[in-house]
Image: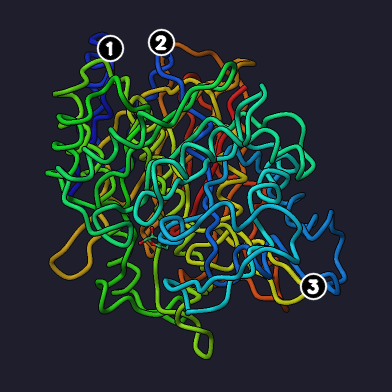
Amino acid sequence: MKRACRRIIPALSLSFLALSASVYETEAQVQVLVNGLNPQQQISRHIYGHFSEHLGRCIYDGFWVGDDMKVPKKDRIRLDIVDALKKINIPNLRWPGGCFADEYHWRDGIGPRSQRPKMVNTNWGGVTEDNSFGTHEFLELCNLLNCEPYVAGNVGSGTVEEMSKWIEYLNFDGQSPMTELRKQNGRSTPWKVSFWGVGNESWGCGGEMTPAYYSDQYRRYSSFAKNYPGAPLKKIASGANVDDYNWTETCMRNIGPRNMWGITLHHYTLSGGWYDKGPATGFDEDRYFGAMKSCQKMETLINRHGAIMDKYDPEKRVALVVDEWGIWTNVEPGTNPGFLYQQNSMRDAIIAANTLNIFNNHSDRVRMACLAQTINVLQALILTEKEKMLLTPTYHVFDLYKVHHDAMLLPVQFKSPEYTRGKDNIEAISISASKDSTGKVHITLANIDPNTKNDVALQLAGFKFSQVEGRIITSASYADVNTFDKPDKIKPVAFKGASVAGSTVNVQLPPLSVVVLELK
Ligand code: AHR
């Protein structure tokens, strides 16, 4: 008999738990209870955010291209990319880094482009940065994308004054030296940026600080990061690397929940380890399994960092901001190792689906996240080759999951079958559900097991419906990819494997698949 892992998503009502007892022991079919009785928790759309660093071909030759590139553009911003990202309702974009943020000096990126000083991008390939993409260009990009900017300020090599003046430049509407400068550069009104990162990875490339030292620095920098009229900042502390729980504990204690809007967590999926990242294509099942196990660690990290945060912040005022996540593999052969260019496979789609379900189910604490990174870097949504662009399997998952943006979480309860490899096993199924403002219920499911179909019975409590419609992303192999020759090999298609029987929806979930269902 197949073993199963009991899985209870928090915040279930007692009556719902009682209802569940009778169905728990069935093995053949995965029994799932979806609690639509009294939704309490909104899934912030900002969980579906993205990250764009001055790294490799994300900004330059990604969003921002040369005048000679024959694609639709506004200034030098690629509009085919803007259109694709608008289709998935991108809610926020993090910039300028990453490690780059802590060596970025914003004044180098304003004013006439021909006069902007150049610099060396020491973190990413040692290339020359010409600063042609700076503050005005980034905020114009966000304007075109209709998304909120999330700016990471420089704590590692910048000054308190530098950060403070940047905020004045961005957000103040009155008369001041910075507003005069902004006007000279062609922008009369402030942008009113709200999401503000106080450093990045301050334990590493952001300054190699201890948590005690960083938390003092945070207090100092954030004292001078002012809230201008009509432009309150959501200040975000640079948080832990993976399972550095001491970092979270020290920051929560020393900074305090009233002095920050959020604190970050970074966790990258690795199929082996940092020194054994493995290829992005042509990998075997051990690599697939290893990556999925690493991906599922996100839930433990959220639970454990969340428990520490609960000690100092039981009201959950502070958001856990997972502003760097996704799979990190070896670069594509022949490409610059400092550019982190990797292909994106069906495995990446499963990683995205599983992670986003985890975020949804923990949306009481996880209220913002950014996938690393949007174009041509790490787990990208979009890959480009000169004028050509393709949408990756990961992009299509964000497309399916956009139904959850700002919807109310419906807790799910089920016992996942296991996906076993050798002596190791992980959960084979990942699910989250929500109800949107029009009353429609959406359920997203991933079958992580590449070998076994899973039959799932979704039992809905507190919601009447008579129809189900679905879309699916699947492929024959976890290593399948979209290429510039076959850009549509992996894309969502109609899903016919779900049917309604009374208050139950029966779903035949193919191996290696991501499904969204809409109940009406
Ligand atoms: O996303 C790539 C890099 O990973 C970022 O610059 C840094 O913050 C992290 O280590």
First in sequence: mark 3 vs mark 1 = 1
- Mark 2 lies on a secondary structure that is loop
Mark in the foreground, 3 or 1: 3
Q: Give me the disc on residue 37.
A: 2
> Given the image, on which type of amino acid does mark 3 rest?
Glu
Task: Determine the residue positioned at 77% across, 42% down.
Answer: 184
Comparing 46 with 119, the one in front is 119
Q: Which residue is mark 1?
A: 13
1 and 2 marks in contact (CB < 8 Å)? yes
Where ligand 1 lies, by quadrant? bottom left
The residue tagged 3 is 387
**Among numbered discs 2 and 3, the one appearing first in the sequence:** 2
Kind of residue at badge 1: Ser
- The residue under the point 46% across, 42% down is 163
Residue 225 coordinates in the image, percent (x, y) = 43, 31
| Eye-nearest disc, 2 or 3 | 3
Q: Quadrant of the C terminus?
A: top right
Q: Gap between marks 1 and 2, in whole Å?
A: 9 Å
Residue 342, visible in the rendered structure: no
Circle 1 sits in a helix, a strand or a loop, which is it?
loop
Give whichever of discs 1 and 2 has the lower sequence position. 1
Q: Which residue is at 50% across, 50% downward? A: 514
**Residue 505 vertical position relative to residue 18 in the rendered view, above or below:** below
